Amino acid sequence: MEPIIKIKEVTFKYNPEDKPALDKVSLDIMPGEFVAILGHNGSGKSTLAKLINSLLLPTEGQIWVKGMNTQDDDKLWDIRQSAGMVFQNPDNQLVATIVEEDVAFGPENQGVEPLEIRKRVDDALKVVDMYEFRRRPPHLLSGGQKQRIAIAGVLALNSDCIILDEPTAMLDPSGRKEVIETITKLNQDEGKTVILITHFMDEAVKAKRVVVMDDGKIHLQGTPKEVFSNVQRIKSFGLDVPQVTEVAHNLIEQGIPLSKDIISIEELVEALCQ
């Protein structure tokens, strides 16, 4: 199986004299995969997302989305349709005064037939559990609901891959929960490839693979268990580990024999009960 996204030796500089924001990064993402990309501010994770979506172009190296080179101007629309992007602030992506009109905006600009647009809008809103709000003004919705509408807009484009750049950073805990449940459902039930850029460790635990970036490079990648078992190394990048992993790590240091790869409360409870 070919990667849906292939990143090969990519370097990116915002200015020629600057230090690279990305430094010879290579990464393959397979169809249907859920990848979380972690890193503190300035690590290069948001730059990587914009490069995949062709909002930026590599200074060196190549990126392919479904076999299309992101530097091919003729494929720009196809690339952005294939790898749809959801940004941090949902208000920046909402363009219409009614929810269903907003979700229809992308397909209308593609020149999709009206009956097909109607179907896509209804299907997308049902997938993100926002169908009953289809005739509401977006400004009356909560932050989490607005973000789900933004995700529906990407789904209506028939995107195979959804890139989410810190989509929960501006949301309260209930809004974060709504959005993460929606993302997980899209991956597991709809088979969408998901790239989640986040600094919330409990969100990264939901992914199948975690990639840790620092200083424009990839330093760690693997399953959440593999990555978060490296507690001291994760902290050396200015990041935290999931709270339950931190508790387990502290207990291990106190001499309690526990596994180093505990990432959920259920696992910790079971290990302690044994």
Image (cartoon, grey):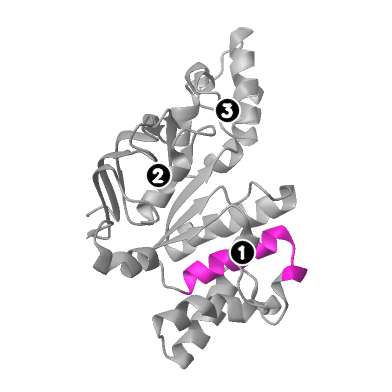
Q: Which residue is mark 3?
A: 241
Snapshot quadrant of residue 135: bottom right
Amino acid type at image mark 3: Val
Span shown in magenta:
139-156
Snapshot quadrant of residue 4: bottom left
C-alpha distance separating marks 1 and 2: 23 Å
Q: Position of residue 269 (x, y in %)?
A: 66, 29
Amino acid type at image mark 2: Leu
Prevalent SS, magenta region:
helix
Pair 1/2: label in front: 2
Label annotation for residue 219: none
C-alpha distance separating marks 3 and 2: 22 Å
Pair 3/2: label in front: 2
Question: N-terminal of the two: label 1 or label 2?
Answer: 2
**What element does badge 1 sit on?**
helix
Residue 149 within the segment the image draws in magenta: yes
Q: Which residue is mark 1?
A: 148
Other-residue count near label 3 (Cα within 10 Å), few / some / many at <14 / 14–19 / ≥20: many
Amino acid type at image mark 1: Arg
